[in-house]
Amino acid sequence: MITESPLLDNPDGPVPGITPTGGPIQSAITYEKIPTHIYADAKDASRAVAQEIADLIRQKQSEGKPCVLGLATGSSPKTVYAELIRMHREEGLSFRNVVTFNLDEYYPMEPDSLQSYWRFMREQLFDHVDIPQGNYHVPDGTVRVDKVGEFAKQYEADIEAAGGLDFQLLGIGGNGHIGFNEPGSLINSHTRLMMLDNSTRAAASSDFGGLPKTPRKAITMGVASILNARRVVLLAWGERKAPVIRGAVEGLVTELNPASYLQTHPNALFVIDEAAASELTRMKTPWLVDSVVWDNKMKKKAVTYLSLTLGKPVLKLTDRDYNDNGMSDLLAQYGQAYDINIDVFNQLQHTITGWPGGKPNADDTNRPERALPAHKRCLIFSPHPDDDIISMGGTFQRLVDQGHEVHIGYQTSGNIAVADDEALRFADYVVDFNAKFGIKSPEATRIFQDAAASLREKKDSEKDTNEVRYVKGLIRMGEAKSTCRFVGIPVENAHFLNMPFYETGTVAKKPLSEEDIKITMALIEEIKPHQIYAAGDLADPHGTHKVCLDAVLEAVRRLKHKNFMKDCWVWLYRGAWAEWDIHEIEMAVPMSPDQVMRKRLGIFKHQSQKDGVVYQGTDSREFWQRAEERNRATAGLYNRLGLAEYEAMEAFVRWRF
């Protein structure tokens, strides 16, 4: 069983939301209807779940019984499976007595397809442990449509014959689905063929090269099948899952959020990270749940929340507003509302600066950045070749305009995000160009001809050849160089790192490697920056942004003893979909309408990412639209809090190493 881990001793008392041990956060829960453990780190959470599974396997072994597991696919359980593999290799955990039944499979789907859950489970777990081949079961995506009903009944019968599920592992969809039980699924539903919700298909479209190629159906175990398991553990990582997690944990039991059915299970547990928990009452407004330590961070969080909730500027909040909304303890500690309001207002005001590199010849006491050195070396890490301009294009331009030496480290090639027809057009152009001007380069011509031939013949289930990935990478590289010229930095200041973890040719990437970290370290040592900007998507434990961030942070940790690192500050920006919470922001760079338009034009340089990109997801907006709406929303929050009104803002949080 997963057990709560105690907080480390803190001279100022426990700090809500912070778990020094990496264990689950504790609190007095009154709002939650399902036991929920919140971990600061998804890896620690996964290790805890893997340990519970391992303990169950060993217990069953000691009893001479099979251990029947219900397993899930997707990004959430990958780290659990990786830990189980490690335990098998290093601790002798045997799977000889394990019998597994997977939740679902796309329909129709060949078992050897890149997107098949049969293939996923073999690659992520079965091929790396000693589970007997006949002991694992995944719904058959090749069964004839008129035989699906018969197959579903047999699947249920096989589970029952095995003794029923001892443990069911779940993920959760953005719409609350468990397995592929979409909203509207009944609590008494069993294994069946299910039409997939459009939001589910959109979320999965990155695996299939676009929404039109994504299956519309799947075979799934039903809600009743899941609830029949003796133990159920649901995993969720990332802020995008936060609203649906709150609904499942704190809301009503409803078919509109199938995960809420787990409230009726006597032995269910949600294991989530802080980002997925961010909408839960104990995280969003912890002072309503239990006593809190009113440090400055908590005070700023509470006051900004109160201001935005009541629709009153910070400076207009009253003692009664505090008392009526569960913050009387805050008044007791800091005095009257007037004094608290002034303090928080000034803190917010001091985050705003038009000088992200520091303002020279100015008092920097209350500025987010240092005045000296007046001309800084700035290194912007961009996970993909367009994240720099999308996420911090206004700040990028400001740094250049204000005379700083700016470098960009493009961490990955971004090649899988180029559509096949775009790559084919580019390959044909190169071949035709060489022929037209009599340029004889047999090797180059062969590469582009092979790429063009591969693109014309490629099946949906096949990944790109090395030549095709090369062509797609060149397209992204050319667009990145165009953006650099547009902003005003020399092309030689664009550094293309092509980190190896990314180069799999599929959406699924390799783990961060030592080579990735050394490549990152080498660039930092070459530039010796005074500022590092990195994509701070801490909430995503499996995506490219998170791996790229891990590489930067580990590189900085290893280099922190170097003299030049003593003058280096690390600033984290967010992606196109989300922004830092207002109380977290430490530097906000405002943009005028003209600067917003210039940023948009910079984003337009990435032509392959316009007009419906390969991995659009559930958001149909183009990247420039997402960025502008996010930046305007940030400026709007500052305005609602009673500060100056700007057209848009980019926000940053400082990482202190």
Image (cartoon, helix red, strand yellow):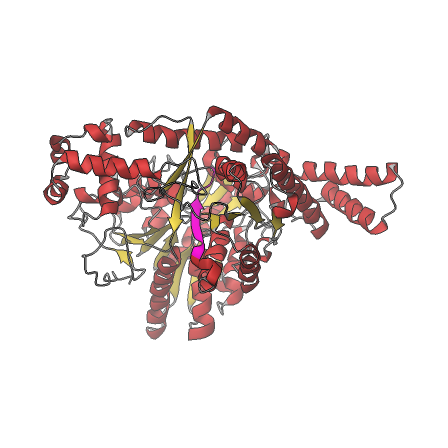
- Compared across the picture, whether 438 is left or right of 284 comes to right
* Front in this rendered view, residue 522 or 112: 522
- Compared across the picture, whether 552 is left or right of 167 comes to right
* Front in this rendered view, residue 244 or 544: 544
Span colored in magenta: 567-576
Residue 344 found in image quarter: top left
Residue 513 percent across, percent down from the top left: 54, 62
- Compared across the picture, whether 331 is left or right of 228 comes to left
* Front in this rendered view, residue 575 or 340: 340
Residue 619 percent across, percent down from the top left: 48, 33
* Front in this rendered view, residue 111 or 40: 40
Could you tell me which quadrant the N terminus lies in? Answer: bottom left
- Which residue is at 38% across, 30% downward? 635
Instruction: Report if residue 245 is visible in the image.
Output: yes
Could you tell me which quadrant the C terminus lies in? Answer: bottom left
Residue 286 percent across, percent down from the top left: 21, 45
